[in-house]
Image (cartoon, helix red, strand yellow):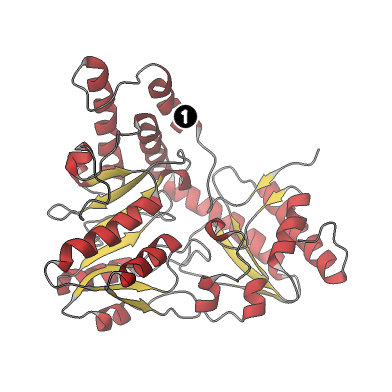
C-alpha cells in the first residue's frame, strides 16, 4: 500500500496530540454547561476562560476582547455584517475589501450590497498584494469598515496589515483582518498592528474543526448575528463548545511556542518542492515569492487541467488542491489567480501545495516526483483516470 502524503494543510490540518489531550476531559467527564452555576458548570466555565486568556496572549490582546464562534466563516460574517448594520445607524454605509478575499468575506459583502450597502473591491498586483495607499484613497466619510485578509489561502501572499491598520486608525475607520491562514504561522500583535477585529479558525493550526474566534478591540463589538441567550457576554448566543475551545487554545499556544522554528522548516520544504516543480517545462509560480506564508506553494502548468492533475496525484497517494477547498466542484478557475492577472488557461491548470507540521523532506521529494510524473503523463495523454 502506497504511503499517503497530505499536502493540503491550508484546507485543514491534522489534530495535534496536545489539542486532543486538552479536549478529552470535556468530551468525557466534565460536560457541564459553562452557563450553569453548580460546580460542573463552573468547572466548564473556568476551562472556557482559561482558553480565552491563552488565545488572547497569542495575539497580544486583552482576554475580554476574545469571542468564541463556530468557525472562521462565522467570525468573518459577524465582523462584516454586524459592523455594517451597527454603523449604518451613524450614516456609515460603505465597506472596503479586496477582490482576493475568502468567499466568507466576498459573499458577506455581496449580501450587504443587496441590503443597500456600498462595497469597494480593491484590486491586487500580479503578486496578489493590495496597496495600503489604495486603501487610503478608497476611504470616504461614509466608510464603516476596511476588511483585508492577513494572508491569502490560495497563493499565500501576506498583505501589508500594519500599514493598513495605521491608515485606518489615523482615519478613524475600523479595520478587520481575516487571519485564518496566518494564526499560529505568523506573529500577530493586534495592538502594534492596529487591528480592530480579527478572525481565526482552530482547524488551520492543528486544532479541531468547528470552533473559531473573533477578536474585537475594547470599545466596539459588532451587532449580534444570532438571537438567543447571553453567552459571550451577550454578544454571541449559543452554548460554548467547551472541549473544542480548550483544544483550540492548546493548539494555538503550541503553534506559537514553535512558530519561528516551524516557519523556517516549512519554508525550506516549500523551496525544495518549488525548485523541483519549476524544473518542469511550462510551469509558473503564482503569488509573491518573498511576502508569503512559509508553507504554501501555488504553481500553474501549461496544457494541464487542474482537476485531472489532482486525480492523478490522488492515485499516487498525494492530497493537494487546485485552490480553495471551499470552492471544490466549481468549474471556474480561482478568482484569486484571475485577479492577480494569471491567464485563464494557466489559472485552470493550477496546483496548491500547502505544508504543515507533520510533512517531511522525504515527502517533499515524493511530491516533486509525483507531480512531475503526473504532468508528464497528462501531457502525453497517459491518464489513469479522467476527471
Can you see residue 194? Answer: no
Residue position marked by numbered label 1 in the rendering: 20
Tell me which residue sits at (46%, 45%) in the image: 205
Tell me the residue at 65%/72% (across/down).
348
Left or right of 376 on screen, residue 22? left
Mark 1 burial class by Cα count in 10 Å: few <14, some 14-19, many 20+: many
Q: 28 above or below 84? A: above
How many marks are shown on the rendered structure? 1
Q: Is residue 357 visible?
A: yes
Q: Label 1, secondary structure: give it.
A: helix
Q: Name the outermost residue toward the bottom.
A: 137
In terms of depth relative to the viewer, which is nearer, 193 or 77? 77
Taking the view exactly as shown, the residue that stands out farthest to the front is: 115
Does residue 214 sit above or below 271 in this rendering?
above
Q: Position of residue 308 (x, y in %)?
A: 74, 63
Viewer-nearest residue: 191 or 376: 376
Question: Quadrant location of the N terminus?
Answer: top right
Residue occupying the point 25% across, 21% down = 41
Horizontally, residue 79 falls left or right of residue 313, namely: left
Residue 78 lies in what quarter of the image? bottom left
Q: Position of residue 98 (x, y in %)?
A: 38, 73
User: Residue 79: x and y, percent?
Assistant: 28, 58
Q: Residue at x 62, y 79 (%)?
A: 344
Quadrant assignment for the C terminus: bottom right
Q: Position of residue 296 (x, y in %)?
A: 55, 59
Amino acid at each position: 500500500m502506497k504511503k499517503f502524503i497530505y499536502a493540503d494543510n491550508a484546507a485543514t490540518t491534522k489534530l495535534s496530540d496536545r489539542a486532543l489531550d486538552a479536549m478529552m476531559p470535556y468530551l468525557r467527564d466534565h460536560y457541564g454547561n459553562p452557563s450553569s452555576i453548580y460546580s460542573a458548570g463552573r468547572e466548564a466555565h473556568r476551562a472556557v476562560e482559561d482558553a480565552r486568556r491563552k488565545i488572547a496572549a497569542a495575539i497580544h490582546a486583552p482576554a475580554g476582547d476574545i469571542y468564541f464562534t463556530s468557525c472562521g466563516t462565522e467570525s468573518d460574517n459577524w465582523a462584516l455584517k454586524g459592523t455594517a448594520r451597527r454603523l449604518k445607524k451613524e450614516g456609515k454605509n460603505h465597506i472596503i475589501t479586496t477582490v482576493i478575499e475568502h468567499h466568507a468575506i466576498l459573499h458577506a459583502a455581496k449580501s450587504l450590497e443587496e441590503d443597500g450597502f456600498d462595497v469597494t473591491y480593491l484590486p491586487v498586483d500580479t503578486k496578489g498584494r493590495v496597496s495600503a495607499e489604495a486603501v487610503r484613497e478608497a476611504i470616504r466619510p461614509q466608510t464603516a469598515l476596511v476588511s483585508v485578509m492577513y494572508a491569502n489561502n490560495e497563493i499565500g501572499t501576506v498583505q501589508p496589515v500594519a500599514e493598513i491598520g495605521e491608515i485606518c486608525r489615523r482615519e478613524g475607520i475600523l479595520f478587520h483582518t481575516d487571519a485564518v491562514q496566518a494564526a499560529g504561522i505568523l506573529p500577530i500583535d493586534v495592538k502594534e498592528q492596529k487591528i480592530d477585529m480579527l478572525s481565526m479558525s482552530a482547524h488551520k493550526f492543528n486544532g479541531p474543526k468547528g470552533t473559531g474566534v473573533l477578536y474585537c478591540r475594547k470599545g466596539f463589538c459588532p451587532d449580534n448575528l444570532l438571537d438567543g441567550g447571553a453567552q459571550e457576554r451577550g454578544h454571541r448566543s449559543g452554548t460554548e463548545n467547551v472541549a473544542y475551545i480548550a483544544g483550540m487554545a492548546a493548539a494555538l499556544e503550541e503553534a506559537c511556542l514553535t512558530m519561528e522554528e516551524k516557519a523556517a522548516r516549512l519554508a525550506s520544504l516549500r523551496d525544495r518542492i518549488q525548485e523541483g516543480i519549476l524544473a518542469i517545462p511550462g510551469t509558473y509560480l503564482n503569488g509573491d515569492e518573498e511576502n508569503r506564508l512559509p508553507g504554501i506553494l501555488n504553481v500553474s502548468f501549461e496544457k494541464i487541467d487542474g482537476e485531472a492533475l489532482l486525480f492523478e496525484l490522488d492515485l499516487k497517494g498525494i492530497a493537494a488542491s487546485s485552490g480553495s477547498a471551499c470552492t471544490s466542484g466549481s468549474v471556474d478557475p480561482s478568482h484569486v489567480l484571475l485577479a492577480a492577472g494569471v491567464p485563464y488557461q494557466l489559472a485552470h491548470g493550477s496546483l496548491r501545495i500547502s505544508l504543515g507540521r507533520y510533512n517531511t523532506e522525504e515527502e517533499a521529494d515524493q511530491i516533486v516526483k509525483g507531480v512531475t510524473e503526473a504532468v508528464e503523463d497528462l501531457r502525453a495523454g497517459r491518464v489513469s483516470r479522467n476527471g
